[in-house]
Amino acid sequence: MRPGAELTVVLHQTRSPDNLGAVCRVMANFGFERLILSEPVVQDFSLAERMAVKSGHILSGMRVAPTLAEALEDCVYVVGTTSRTQVVKRAPLTPEDAARRLAEESTRGRVALLFGGEQRGLSDEDLTHCQDLLVIPTSDVQPSMNLAQSSAVLLYLCHRQGLTSAPVLPQEEEAGARLGTLNALSGRMRAAMLAADFLNPEAPQHVLHELERTLMRARLTQREAELWLNAFKHLGRAVAPGTPRE
């Protein structure tokens, strides 16, 4: 089993058109086609054509999202890449384990492999959108990999999932909660808990991010997430009567 058509490659704040074209080529190498750019720095995508050998269909078919949250909104599971081995309260997966998790979670809906920009990678805030993060083991001499190189390593591993042994038929699973729904739920939770004096209004994100990670680990179905969202809509109106009803 491999992520296949359910895998989305998301490039956040990409600067280099050469890297963009090279990632398209790697995606074509291994049979992946869904590409989203989030807040891209590069604007002239035609400059990527030189490196996108036999992968122009991926370049022309990619989607551009104004924010990272919008890029990931229809995904049920996201792995973010980083070269940092220590992120607060986050234990990174190995590349092999990440590829395996992407394949497993793809039975619930679309999954995403998220890459950060060439200059700073993914910030701690960016990584809050991810259920897991991964680190590619590298030498201390040069721990950071080029975007195109890291995409080649990881997409190869995703491609190899299930190709070295007899295929296992995935069990039927109810559709997983989309990140767009979980983000809407987070917004409702924040408003209700601020009104109830549960969150510190000066720094609400610290506790809120912990609660968000709890919901992500719970692997909610879309129906369950919508129930939670509806519950917090009603709770919000109860603790803050002026809250809009939409």
Image (tube, rainbow, N blue to C red):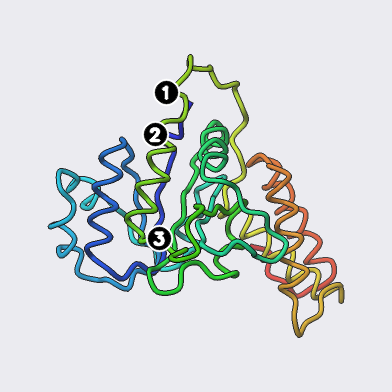
Depth check, mark 1 against mark 3: the one in front is 3
Q: Is residue 215 left or right of residue 34?
A: right
Q: What residue is pinned by disc 1?
A: 163
Question: Which residue is outermost to the top?
Answer: 166
* Amino acid carrying mark 2 in the image: His
Question: Which residue is outermost to the left?
Answer: 50
The secondary element bearing badge 3 is classed as loop
Q: Is residue 75 above or below residue 5?
A: below
Labels 1 and 3: the sequence-earlier one: 3
Q: What residue is pinned by disc 2?
A: 159
Q: What residue is pinned by disc 3?
A: 145
* Amino acid carrying mark 1 in the image: Leu
- Can you give x and y, in whole percent of width and height, for residue 160 in the image? 41, 31
Query: CA gap, disc 1 to disc 3?
Result: 26 Å
Query: CA gap, disc 3 to disc 2?
Result: 20 Å
Total residue callouts: 3
Q: Splitting the image into 4 quarters, where does residue 31 fall?
A: top left
User: Along the line of sight, which residue is nearer the eye, 133 or 35?
Assistant: 133
* Amino acid carrying mark 3 in the image: Met
